[in-house]
Amino acid sequence: MIDIEHLPWRMEDYVARMGTCNVGRNDAQEQRLEMEFPVGPEFRTPQGQGKHFRDPLTVVDAGGKILLWYLPGVISQDAQVCKTCCGGDSGLTPEPVRLNGGRGSKHSNS
């Protein structure tokens, strides 16, 4: 069973309030946004810190839009693609996968 947590605001309102050209971190704006768009106590520890979730979770905004699915263990560590594997320091580059049987597809004839 997956828990569903509801936020008391709509994501569209949050994005509109953020404005444009948000580059870097603006602590004053972060505080304003946190006051106007709070997360509920289910996302905080009793000490007020961000909570770490271990169980599957869905986060839905006030308009009913799914913002997040947290599904731990669904994708194995081996299947996950990370920055290091995708052109980072390792030098490894994943081969593209095509569903039409082209190069890199599991269904290709080559």
Image (tube, helix red, strand yellow):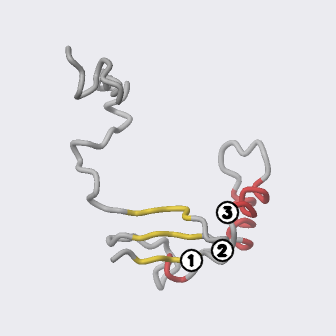
Q: Which residue is mark 3?
A: 11
For the point 68% across and 69% down, the residue is: 34
Q: Which residue is mark 2?
A: 62
- Near mark 3 (Cα within 10 A), the count class, few <14, some 14-19 or many ≥20, is some
1 and 2 marks in contact (CB < 8 Å): yes
Judged from this view, the residue extending furthest toward the top is: 110
- Name the amino acid type tagged 3: Met
- Near mark 2 (Cα within 10 A), the count class, few <14, some 14-19 or many ≥20, is few
7 w.r.t. 24: above or below: below
Q: Secondary structure at mark 1?
A: strand
Q: Which residue is more in the foreground, 85 or 57? A: 57
Measured from the top left, where is residue 24 in percent x and y? 66, 44
Quarter of the figure that contains the N terminus: bottom left
Q: Where is residue 81, by image quadrant?
A: top left
Give the mark, 1 or 2, whose residue is nearer the N terminus.
1
Total count of labels: 3
The numbered dot on residue 6 is 1
Mark 1–mark 3 distance (CA, rounded to whole Å): 12 Å
Q: Which residue is more in the foreground, 2 or 27? A: 2
Mark 1–mark 2 distance (CA, rounded to whole Å): 7 Å
- Name the amino acid type tagged 1: His
Q: Secondary structure at mark 3?
A: helix
